[in-house]
Image (tube, grey):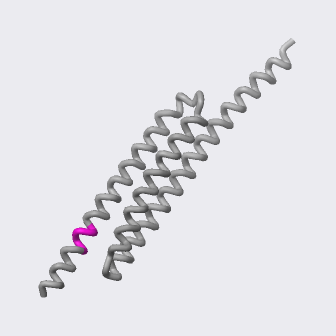
Amino acid sequence: MLDEIEREFEAARRQSMLDAIEREFEAVTDSFKQLVISLRPKMRGPICKEAKDIKFFQNYSAAATSSLKKLNLEDSTVGDAKRNSMLEARAETQRSSTLEEIEREYEAAASAKAYGKYSQQLQKVHQP
């Protein structure tokens, strides 16, 4: 009886830790998206900023994924291991899709900037 109560307590503690990690991950993801949105009007040197932003996000995601993996390894029950695995997969999927979205936005901005320069040069060539 006491062992069962201790297992339930441990499972609840782990779930609480997983929930806290997931909330932190979501908050950072939202903050990062807001940062990218706020940078759009100031796209005057996005390549350097893009590299720093993506590296920060990758490091944070790796830390969150690492924490989930540690909890998964420490987990003693099959149900908790499956839940941890699902959370880890969800975090990885979210991280990948967010990075892809950011890369597409930066590529679109760089393409628009390059097109603007090309248009200006083309106008200079065709002026009498």
Q: Nearer the viewer, residue 114 or 70?
A: 70
Give me the residue at 32% from left, 75% from top.
75
> Dividing the image into 4 quarters, which one contains the C terminus?
top right
- In the picture, measured across the screen, residue 26 lies left or right of residue 53, that is left
Q: Residue at x 46, y 57 (%)?
A: 62
Looking at the image, the residue that sits furthest to the left is 2
What stretch of residues is rendered in magenta?
Answer: 11-15
Q: Is residue 114 above or below residue 5?
A: above
Position of residue 49 measured from the top left corner of the image (x, y, whole percent): 54, 36
- Rendered-image quadrant of the N terminus: bottom left
**Magenta-colored stretch includes residue 12:** yes
* Position in image of residue 22 (x %, y %): 35, 59
Name the spot of residue 73 as percent of width and height, x first.
Answer: 38, 73
Question: Taken as a whole, is the magenta stretch helix, strand or loop?
Answer: helix
Residue at image location 81% in from the left, 24% down from the top: 122
Q: Residue at x 53, y 57 (%)?
A: 96
Query: Going by the picture, which residue comes out furthest to the bottom?
Result: 1
Residue 101 percent coordinates (x, y): 55, 49
- Where on the picture, by quarter, is residue 16? bottom left
